[in-house]
Image (spheres, helix red, strand yellow):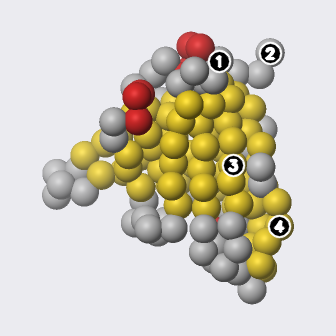
Amino acid sequence: QAQVTESGGGSVQAGGSLKLSCTASDRIYSKNFMGWFRQAPGKEREGVAAVATGSIRTHYADSVKGRFTISRDDAKNTAYLQMNSLKPEDTAKYYCAAASVVYRADGSRYIRPDVSPGDWGQGTQVTVSS
């Protein structure tokens, strides 16, 4: 049984919008943060957004800040990623997973997956054309 299921990806032109959804098992959804990650061909997976339980805190990668909004519905074990003003560089496969927010010594922070190997879903492809 899949632990996480993502949906909502598609192909859009630059400047367009998409809304991704992710439903997770209780075990995964109960962790402190749910996050969205993306991986483009030939690149490492990066965390783009995370939201704490109860939606009391959100974190974003600098590359998406002001354009993407993460949210969650704890009654449905579902997290969302509203993506506006999409750019071709947003093209990637997007994944949802439990997450942690890690602070570096310089005060900056990044979003790290908090998963076991079998916890990743199939992802959903987002393609943005110029």
Residue position marked by numbered label 1 in the rendering: 25
The image shows residue 104 at horizontal and vertical percentages of: 23, 50
For label 4, the residue is: 11
* Residue at horizontal 77 percent and vertical 67 percent from the top: 127
Give the amino acid at mark 3: Leu
Q: Is residue 115 left or right of residue 25?
A: left
Say which amino acid is labelled 2.
Answer: Gln
**Location of residue 114 with respect to 86 vertically, above or below:** above
Q: Is residue 87 above or below residue 93?
A: below
**Mark 4: which amino acid?**
Ser
Q: Residue at x 80, y 15 (%)?
A: 1
Q: Which mark is residue 20?
A: 3
> What distance separates the C-alpha of mark 4 from that of mark 2?
28 Å
Crowd band around label 3 with a 10 angstrom C-alpha radius: few (<14), some (14–19), many (20+): many
Q: Is there any visible trace of residue 42 in the rendered image?
A: no
Q: For the point 70% across and 80% down, which residue is it?
A: 14
**Is tag 3's residue or tag 2's residue first in the polypeptide sequence?**
2
Residue 86 in the figure: left or right of residue 105: right
Regarding mark 3 in the picture, which secondary structure is present there?
strand
Q: Quadrant of the C terminus?
A: bottom right
Return the mark for residue 89: none
Q: Nearer the viewer, residue 2 or 77?
A: 77
Nearer to the camera, 8 or 88: 8
How many angstroms separate mark 1 from mark 3 (CA)? 17 Å
The residue pinned by badge 2 equals 1
> Looking at numbered disc 1 in the image, what kind of residue is underneath it?
Ser
> Is residue 36 something that shows in the picture?
yes
